[in-house]
Image (spheres, rainbow, N blue to C red):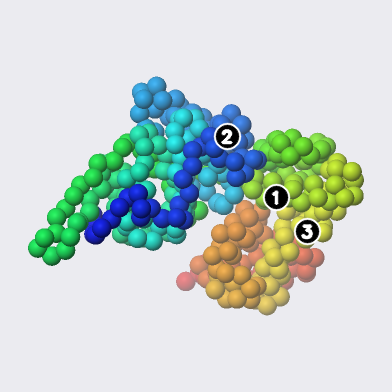
Amino acid sequence: MKQEFNDFNPEEDSPVAVTFQRADEKTENVLRPQYLEDFQGQAQLKENLSVFIKAARERGEALDHTFLIGPPGLGKTTLASIIANEMHSELRMTSAPALDKPKDLAGILTNVTENSIFFIDEIHRLKPALEEMLYIAMEDFEIDWVIGQGPSARTMRIPLPRFTLIGATTKAGSVSTPLSERFGITGHLEYYNDEELKKIVLRSADILSCRIDDEAASLLAHCSRGTPRIANRLLKRLRDFADVMKGGCIDTDIVRYGLDKLGIDSNGLEKQDRAILRTIIQFYQGGPVGADTLSISVGEAVETLEDFYEPYLIQQGYLKRTPRGRMVTRKAYDLLNIEYNGGSTDADQGLLF
């Protein structure tokens, strides 16, 4: 796709919202692992990436474009940093909402270096004009733009160094087929099990110089919704409780006390999770209820409801989606100590026509 860039200067017009940094200089989050061997969980994905990275390094080539898919907090950004470290490459990071105009993207692409890593988070939010520019950049390592206007306009094709685009998304279905098919490597990140999260908690506690016993680490892992980001966030808050109440040592009593103060139960459900289930039961007879109606009832945006709360509630068997909307299960009634009313019929769920 050709774009107009009158008086465009790649050096001057690069967007300030974009963060440029070398992978080995990344210090914004000390808890993030720097290499694949330190990255817990996602065993199959790690194994595949290690092979692809080693092969690309031995050939002296850029790694193929990589597409990372998964819920928030599972490590997509961390993996991008790890890939850059393993490839000994420069890392440039941005998010799709920060790229407003074609010249923003062109400013980055014309400044990438050979075999460097360019990471775009939330790539499903990329504007169509920018997405089309990426097609040529990913396949031919070139970009086109038009200089001038009217009869005097001329097209200039600018060659780019061979680079690796890493795109991350929580909504793979929102990424267009032409873009997703241009990624040579696709990785799906799954929720972590308790044992994997326990290892993450113990590693993070060691980095933070925080004492935590084995049983407390297991309990904390179980309440972390299968998500490392949540596990690390809870660990930091429990460290605060431990520093004030237990001389800095996190034991099971501190975990239970801290989680109770934070409104998190033994199943990892937060106050809002329980409010969602209770609302469906008390106001909508257990469902079905549409996402828009439910989001208004609980005071959350539809996107937050669908991306953060619903996946875990569905995974744990408290909620289900039907053609007519959301419905709670018998397990949700038991959780909230509400008498089960038998639920809706198949016709209510829209399963009979």
Q: Which residue is mark 2?
A: 34
The disc labelled 2 sits on which kind of residue? Gln
> Where is mark 1, residue-wise?
233
Residue extending furthest toward the right:
246
The residue lying at 57 percent from left, 52 percent from top is 72
Amino acid type assigned to the residue bearing label 1 in the image? Arg
- Residue 9's spot in the image, x, y percent? 30, 52
Residue 172 visible in the displayed image: no
Q: Residue at x 66, y 53 (%)?
A: 316
Image check: 313 left or right of 260? left
Residues at circles 3 and 2 in contact by the CB criterion of under 8 Å: no
Where is residue 56? Give x, y as percent. 39, 27
Crowding at dot 1, Cα within 10 Å, few <14 / some 14-19 / many 20+, comes out as few
- Neighbours of disc 2 within 10 Å: few (<14), some (14-19), many (20+): many
Crowding at label 3, few (<14), some or many (≥20) Cα neighbours within 10 Å?
some
Residue 303, relative to residue 9: is it above or below? below
> Which callout, 3 or 2, points to the residue nearer the camera?
2
- Direction from residue 216 to residue 154 in the image, left or right: left
Tag 3: amino acid:
Leu
Whichever of labels 3 and 2 marks the residue nearer the N terminus, that label is: 2
Query: Mark 2 or 1 closer to N-term?
Result: 2
In the image, which disc is placed on residue 65? none
Q: Residue at x 67, y 68 (%)?
A: 276
Q: Quadrant of residue 182?
A: top left
Residue 225 lies, in percent from the top left, at 67, 51
SS at mark 3 in the image = loop
Between the residue at mark 2 and the residue at mark 1, the CA separation in whole angstroms equals 19 Å
Q: Which element type, helix, strand or loop, lies under badge 2?
A: loop
Q: Which residue is mark 3?
A: 262
The image quadrant that residue 322 belongs to is: bottom right
Above or below, comparing residue 332 to residue 251 in the picture: below
Query: In this view of the protein, which residue sits in the foreground, 339 or 217?
Result: 217
